[in-house]
Amino acid sequence: MATTMQGSAAPLTSEHVRVIGASSLGTVFEWYDFYLYGSLAPIIATHFFTSLAPGAAFIMALLTFAAGFAVRPFGALVFGRLGDLIGRKYTFLITIAIMGFSTLAVGLLPTYGTIGIAAPVLLVLLRCLQGLALGGEYGGAATYVAEHAPPGKRGLYTSFIQTTATVGLFLSLLVILVTRTSVGEDAFKAFYWRLPFVISLLLLIISLWIRLKLNESPLFQQMKAEGKGSKAPLTDSFGNWGNGKVVVLALLGATAGQAVVWYAGQFYALFFLTQTLKVDAVTANLLIAAALAIATAGFVFFGWLSDRIGRKPIIMAGCLLAALTYFPIFKALTHYANPALEAAAAKSPAVVVADPKDCAFQFVPGELKGQIKFTSSCDVLKNLLNARSVDYTNEVAPAGTLASVRLGATAISSVDLKALTPDEAKAAQAKLATDVTAAIDAAGYPKTADSAQMNKPMVLLLLTILVLYVTMVYGPIAAWLVEMFPTRIRYTSMSLPYHIGNGWFGGFLPTTAFALVLASGNMYSGLWYPVIIALGTFIIGSLFLRETKDVDITK
């Protein structure tokens, strides 16, 4: 305890500032690179998947983005092992170089029209390289900073690393917005979408220059000098039950819940505003960016607080608060962002009456609504309702029944396009679309959110609360993970649960949540995914993970 108190009073030296700054700047740069692709996926689809139909092209662009999430745990294994064998500094020099040059290459990559099928193949390869690099970057930066921090300040020092994902997202949105408005939408889509990727070269040069000036982690140097390093980090991390059990508990009792709260509070909130509530993209991005700017200091605050009261209670509280309040917060977003949609849903609820066997699973990203064609009577009808964000409940009809919808006092029968000729199907679908659209309009469902009716201060407040939950679960997580594992296998052991949690549980949250909404017809159904995962993490973490703020990490 005396050691901890002395550490708490230790001053922040210039070496500490350099370590925190270099690690944080490099990680901001990596997150900036990673988010650029996600933000620009619709535009990239038009340049690299032009041999496909528009709908299929965008799906391929999304799958290419998902590839970056999918390979992150493998990057954690590859670079975690290197970090425990050759050192933290040299490993995250490698990861930042791979990320930087991969991102620059995306900005310079010839399109499908120039080099054919090689363009999308190279694009997928570059996305995988980015994901691998990010899988190795975070563990190295967090471990490096924590091993430089004096006792009693690991939460505070590593919290600066935790700001980097949000700052990287904020920076990518800002650069895209400035470029877009400067050159105009048409020019941006045609060529200048490349500029944010190319700008990353400057960030790479600065980050490499700063990191080259750093020394190796003192704990790693001491461990190597004493000959206590691991010769097989992967085997030592996952090949014995003692450490492997901690890895599993760290995933289920810490990072899984942290990840879904992080992605729900930032990515899914943005998706909900633009795709479900029909808020225009510029307004939604500005509101999200403002919420990030307001709440980002929370990462440092909760990191500092975790040095005093512990990592575990703050992270568990963030997961529990998210699980208990997501539904009322997102319903409040509807009330303040698009009150006309809320009023229409309450006044004229929709009911789809159909044979369940006639209804396929409709996973269609928002940008593709109206582009993917459905043929069964149920699918045709639900697609029209989904395109206008009309909530509906499902009512089972006898087998073979033609699907229909009741919208308030209006009832409309669908059409089965499979039984018609192409010309007949086109005419029948056009008539159904006209009838359903007229009923939706008559019921008061808005095509877009009315900016004049939107209560922007309240929307901003709600988004800020969501981001504050993010800061609660994310601010102390790096210190907690670092303190769970011994120095000789720390990089490897902490990286895998972090990147499975954030790459898989969190990274696929928007896709999973959207699929749940389409399956049920309820705009809030997607929230069950983060609520259940966050609640599960709260229970497992509370029962099975220990507090670590006072542990000696030199062993």
Image (spheres, helix red, strand yellow):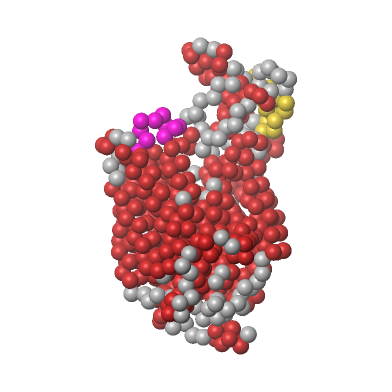
Q: Is residue 387 magenta?
A: no
Task: Report which quarter residue 313 is drawn in.
Answer: bottom right
Q: Which residues are magenta?
A: 46-57
Q: Is residue 460 visible?
A: no
Nearer to the camera, 97 or 160: 97
Residue 412 is situated, as x and y percent measured from the top left of the image, at 65, 21
The answer to whether residue 396 is left or right of residue 186 is right
Side of 116 relative to 52 (left or right):
left
Does residue 448 appear anywhere in the picture? Answer: yes
> For residue 52: magenta?
yes
Residue 17: image x %, image y %?
42, 77
User: Residue 266: x, y in percent?
Assistant: 54, 54
What residue appears at the point 47 percent right and 29 percent down from the top-left corner?
371
Residue 524 is situated, as x and y percent measured from the top left of the image, at 65, 43
Tell me the quarter of the image containing the C terminus.
Answer: bottom right
Q: Tell which of 441 and 197 is nearer to you.
A: 197
Residue drawn at x 49%, y 85% is 11
Q: Residue at left 39%, top 38%? A: 45
The answer to whether 67 is drawn above or below residue 423 in the figure is: below
- Image position of 148 with respect to 241: above or below: below
